[in-house]
Every structure is written in C-alpha cells, then in structure tokens.
Image (spheres, rainbow, N blue to C red):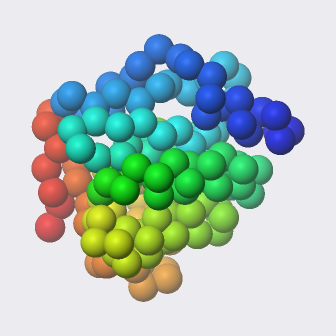
C-alpha cells in the first residue's frame, strides 16, 4: 500500500454501508486488504475497521484520529469485519480510548471479534472499554 492509497481509502466516496440501525459508513474500497473509515451518525463518530488492520494503515489511522478529534463526539468503533490486527491497530484503538476518556467522550467497541478482545485482555484493557453487540439487530451494550 502506498501513501496515496492510504489517503484515498478515506477520501474516496463509496456506497454507504449500514453498521447498525441508522448508522452509515462507507464500505470497503475495491481490492484493499483492510482499512479504517470514519463517518458520523446519531451524534457519534463511527470508525469502521475492516480486514487486516496493521502498520500498513498507519496513515489511515492518523487521519481517522484527526477526524475523530475534530468532531468532538463520542466514538463507536465497528470491528465486525476485522480479520487481523497487529500492535499498530491495537495502539490506534487504545489511543482512541485514551483521548475519549480524557475528553469525556466515551469509546464503544461494536461487534469486536475475539482476536481484538484477546489483545485487549493481554494488555489489561478488556474491561476498560465498553462493548456493544448488534447480533443482526439494534446495538446492545455487553456487560
């Protein structure tokens, strides 16, 4: 992935993909292996991570972080389509959590797969970040 690809993935308009009731974030562009996309719905910033989220997406993660900070809203990270995440991707999620916590804007992980939950558990953050599940219906907080 080149630097041009990283910025294109976030700026190229694509057909909206529902992430939950009333939520729309652009879908994955073309043949990319993974991505990070930012949208907004129902008074929240929606960050969608899909495919392989690793160091190759550093530019997308940085741009997404800036977009989240500029909006000043609580953040939902939709991770349902995540297939791989490395320490760079985990650092992105943890940075979103820290900034949100510091600013009083809570982060919620939506449909986080076990691979992400296992990493959060490994670093002692599994219980610090709120989670919700859609299970094909409305989003419900997971205890």
Residue drawn at (47%, 58%) of the image: 69
Most distant residue in the right direction: 2
- Foreground pick, 65 / 56: 65
Q: Position of residue 129 (x, y in %)?
A: 32, 70
Q: Position of residue 43 (x, y in %)?
A: 23, 44
Residue 97, above or below 78:
below
Q: Is residue 138 visible?
A: yes
Q: Is residue 90 visible?
A: no
Residue drawn at (61%, 40%) of the image: 35
The quarter of the displayed image where residue 21 is located? top left
- Foreground pick, 10 / 21: 10
**Image quarter hosting the C terminus:** bottom left
Q: Tell me if 24 is positioned left or right of 67 in this view.
A: left
Residue drawn at (44%, 71%) of the image: 99
Q: Tell me if 140 is positioned left or right of 62 in this view.
A: left
Q: Position of residue 93 (x, y in %)?
A: 49, 63
């Amino acid at each position: 992935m080149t630097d041009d690809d990283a910025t294109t993935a976030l700026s190229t308009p694509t057909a909206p993909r529902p992430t939950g009731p009333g939520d729309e974030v652009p879908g994955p562009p073309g043949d990319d292996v993974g991505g990070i996309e930012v949208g907004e719905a129902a008074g929240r910033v929606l960050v969608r991570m899909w495919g392989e989220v690793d160091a190759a997406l550093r530019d997308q993660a940085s741009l997404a972080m800036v977009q989240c900070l500029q909006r000043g809203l609580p953040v939902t990270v939709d991770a349902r389509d995540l297939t791989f995440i490395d320490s760079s991707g985990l650092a992105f999620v943890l940075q979103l959590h820290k900034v949100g916590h510091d600013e009083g804007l809570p982060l919620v992980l939506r449909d986080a797969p076990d691979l992400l939950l296992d990493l959060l558990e490994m670093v002692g953050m599994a219980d610090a970040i709120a989670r919700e599940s859609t299970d094909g219906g409305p989003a419900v907080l997971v205890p």
